[in-house]
């Protein structure tokens, strides 16, 4: 047994005070007593009244015991005596508060989040004093904010600091998490209480059928309609540095069709607009062209008033288009100008060999039949290097040599399959360990590539002087070389604004996982998986994530809220709303009513036995002496 309303020290202090108050009157003579003597003449008055010690033994001990027993019973009733052990009956409850993106929607004059916090605080107040509560937040992940806590103010302070997140609710995972918490850490499992809108992605159904025991759902609903942006994308169009394609996907989450205006602004200036007709529960996609070489902010807005404002606009940064710089050292610039300037991702400058500088590592150096005294420090293209000082050893010079094999397994030979190319005159190089043979003739390598100390490609023939310039393979090969030497300028780049949580990105089946990097805005690596050409990673908060796979780059601005599409309807076995009584279904049995009734009966019994005599007895009378027979010659004094 235990006292729910009093501690042990408090109970013992009150018990001592009660025993003293009940016992003290029984230690005094409460009435004047009457004596019968034989004659007054034998009575001699004393000069000083005799001292009478009023303290003595307890008179009427049964009355004292009954009153003391009644007081103890009343004290136990006040202390709320319960049967069993306090730990056996105290329950541990898990309170799950929905902080998904939809909780930021307005309902009347307040948001759903504000209403949910009021309901959560009301539930905490209804929990019995001996029970503990653990508070957890649920959106795409489950985040415990407290341990199992008996201090109600600690729980209330944690509830007041909660705000809506940016991802949708995964309720099934949250309930499973709460069940495991109770199994592992609860003294006695109590209720699992979910407070929120219960708006789930997809169909809203659970994959598993069983719900946790003791589940309670306190719904917080919004009746407003909502239209929002699902995704905004930006990618280069046609390989040009100044042409972009903007992709916008919007969704109507409501139950009726809506017509809304879509507006695009770049640098605060309108660059596109369209009126969309959105059917209920459907997505609609739109594309817009954007032409700019400057960096800036692109804002996409839906001009609509609805329940949730945060999904009506998205802002993404248009990256600057930085071309690859190429310096060509040649005596005949007209020969190479068509090959190089056809690549829109490069910016070429033509110089005479006498103007050569080797210290610039940030440019691609093209050496047309010219061997400088010092090799380039950065990437370079060597075209038919003559004499001593060539970067590769020349075995021989071949004439009318057909190309027998292309290094198509490498990016330099991508798309090259022709067997009809015949080189009028070409140098044949002797490769060393680590070299890449891009094109080979019968006697050896006609085009060679190496990666140390920088990327260099060596042509044994001039691509624009012989009849090879009329073959499609030669400009395609030169384009592959420029792309390999400047992957950043040629890489496909996309900027995407979408919601956080689990993100899936199709990257193709040929991507090497060792070259993939997924980094957040702080530069930290995020874990990812790559299966069947689809890269998946997870981000539970609004952040900027950069994904690179070597020659391609994606920038994710995970700022759009992820809104659920269907409300969860619990089965009839799930309790709903705030509890009308104590939330602990297994609360211990209280005895205060029985104890108070027993104390009243004991007082009544004491009164019936002793109260009537005290009521009839007058002051100055003594019941024990009144019944004594009068002695002969005696008189009453």
Image (tube, rainbow, N blue to C red):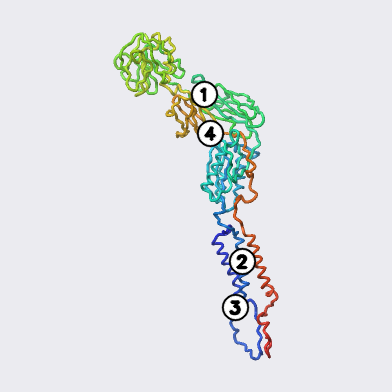
Whether the residues at callouts 1 and 2 have beta carbons within 8 Å, the answer is no
Q: Which residue is mark 4?
A: 500
Q: CA distance from mark 3 to mark 2?
A: 25 Å
Q: Is residue 334 visible?
A: no
Instruction: Determine whether the residue tagged by mark 1 lies in a helix, strand or loop.
Output: strand
Q: CA distance from mark 1 to mark 2?
A: 85 Å
Q: Which residue is mark 1?
A: 235
Query: Would residue 555 be found to the left or right of residue 80 on screen?
Result: left
> Eyeballing the image, is 321 above or below 117?
above
> Eyeballing the image, is 354 above or below 95?
above
Quadrant location of the N terminus?
bottom right
Whether the residues at callouts 3 and 2 have beta carbons within 8 Å, the answer is no
- Looking at the image, which is closer to me, 33 or 211? 211
Instruction: Determine whether the residue tagged by mark 2 lies in a helix, strand or loop.
Output: helix
**Residue 573, position in %: x, y?**
63, 43
Marked residue nearer the N-terminal end (1 or 3): 3
Q: Which residue is mark 2?
A: 71
Image mark count: 4
Q: CA distance from mark 4 to mark 2?
A: 65 Å
Q: Furthest-front residue in view?
A: 209
The crowding category of the residue bearing disc 1, from other C-alpha atoms within 10 Å (few below 14, some 14 to 19, many at least 20), is some
Q: Which mark is residue 54?
A: 3
Q: CA distance from mark 3 to mark 4?
A: 87 Å
**Residue 27, position in %: x, y?**
59, 75
Instruction: Determine whether the residue tagged by mark 4 lies in a helix, strand or loop.
Output: loop
| Front label number (3 vs 2) | 2
The crowding category of the residue bearing disc 2, from other C-alpha atoms within 10 Å (few below 14, some 14 to 19, many at least 20), is many
**Residue 448, position in %: x, y?**
36, 18
Q: Is residue 59 visible?
A: yes
Q: Which mark is residue 558?
A: none
Query: On the image, which quarter does residue 115 sit in?
Result: top right
Marked residue nearer the N-terminal end (4 or 2): 2
């Amino acid at each position: 047994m235990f006292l729910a309303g009093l501690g042990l020290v408090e109970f013992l202090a009150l018990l001592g005070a009660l025993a003293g108050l009940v016992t003290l009157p029984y230690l005094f003579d409460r009435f004047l007593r009457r004596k019968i003597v034989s004659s007054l003449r034998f009575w001699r008055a004393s000069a000083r009244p005799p001292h009478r010690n009023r303290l003595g033994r307890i008179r009427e001990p049964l009355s004292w015991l009954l009153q003391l027993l009644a007081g103890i019973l009343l004290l136990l009733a006040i202390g709320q005596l319960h049967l069993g052990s306090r730990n056996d009956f105290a329950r541990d409850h898990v309170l799950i508060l929905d902080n998904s993106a939809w909780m930021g929607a307005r309902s009347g004059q307040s948001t759903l989040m504000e209403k949910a916090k009021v309901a959560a605080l009301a539930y905490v107040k209804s929990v019995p004093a001996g029970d503990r509560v653990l508070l957890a937040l649920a959106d795409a992940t489950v985040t415990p904010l407290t341990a199992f806590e008996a201090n109600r103010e600690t729980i209330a302070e944690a509830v007041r600091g909660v705000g809506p997140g940016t991802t949708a609710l995964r309720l099934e995972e949250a309930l499973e998490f709460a069940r495991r918490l109770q199994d592992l850490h609860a003294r006695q499992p109590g209720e699992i209480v979910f407070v929120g809108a219960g708006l789930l992605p997809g169909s809203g159904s659970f994959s598993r059928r069983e719900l946790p025991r003791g589940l309670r759902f306190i719904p917080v609903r919004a009746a407003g309609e909502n239209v929002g942006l699902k995704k905004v994308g930006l990618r280069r169009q046609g390989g040009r540095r100044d042409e972009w394609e903007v992709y916008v996907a919007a969704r109507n989450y409501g139950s009726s069709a809506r017509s809304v205006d879509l507006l695009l602004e770049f640098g605060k200036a309108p660059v596109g607009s369209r009126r969309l007709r959105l059917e209920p529960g459907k997505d609609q996609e739109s594309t817009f062209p954007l032409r700019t070489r400057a960096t800036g902010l692109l804002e996409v807005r839906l001009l609509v008033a609805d329940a949730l404002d945060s999904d009506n606009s998205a802002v993404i940064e248009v990256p600057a288009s930085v071309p690859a710089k190429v310096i060509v050292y040649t005596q005949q610039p007209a020969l190479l100008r068509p090959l190089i300037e056809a690549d829109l991702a490069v910016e070429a400058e033509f110089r005479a060999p006498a103007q050569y500088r080797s210290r610039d590592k940030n440019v691609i150096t093209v050496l047309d039949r010219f061997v400088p005294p010092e090799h380039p420090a950065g990437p370079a293209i060597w075209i038919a290097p003559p004499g001593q000082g060539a970067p590769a050893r020349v075995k021989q010079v071949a004439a009318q040599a057909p190309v027998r094999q292309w290094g198509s397994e490498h990016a330099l030979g991508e798309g090259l399959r022709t067997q009809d190319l015949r080189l009028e005159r070409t140098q044949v190089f002797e490769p060393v360990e680590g070299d890449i043979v891009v094109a080979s003739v019968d006697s050896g390598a006609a085009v060679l590539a190496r990666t140390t100390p920088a990327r260099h490609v060596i042509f044994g023939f001039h691509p624009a002087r012989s009849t090879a310039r009329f073959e499609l393979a030669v400009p395609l090969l030169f384009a592959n070389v420029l792309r390999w030497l400047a992957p950043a300028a040629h890489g496909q780049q996309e900027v995407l604004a979408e919601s956080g949580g689990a993100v899936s990105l199709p990257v193709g089946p040929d991507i090497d996982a060792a070259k993939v990097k997924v980094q957040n805005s702080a530069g930290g690596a995020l874990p990812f998986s790559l299966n069947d050409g689809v890269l998946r990673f997870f981000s539970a908060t609004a952040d900027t994530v950069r994904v690179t796979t070597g020659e391609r780059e994606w920038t994710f601005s995970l700022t759009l809220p992820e809104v659920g599409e269907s409300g969860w309807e619990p089965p009839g076995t799930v309790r709903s709303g705030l509890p009308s009584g104590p939330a602990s279904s297994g609360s211990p049995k209280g005895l205060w009513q029985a104890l108070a009734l027993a104390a009243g009966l004991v007082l009544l019994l004491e009164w019936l036995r002793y109260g009537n005599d005290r009521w009839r007895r007058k002051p100055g009378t003594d019941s024990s002496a009144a019944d004594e027979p009068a002695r002969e010659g005696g008189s009453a004094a």
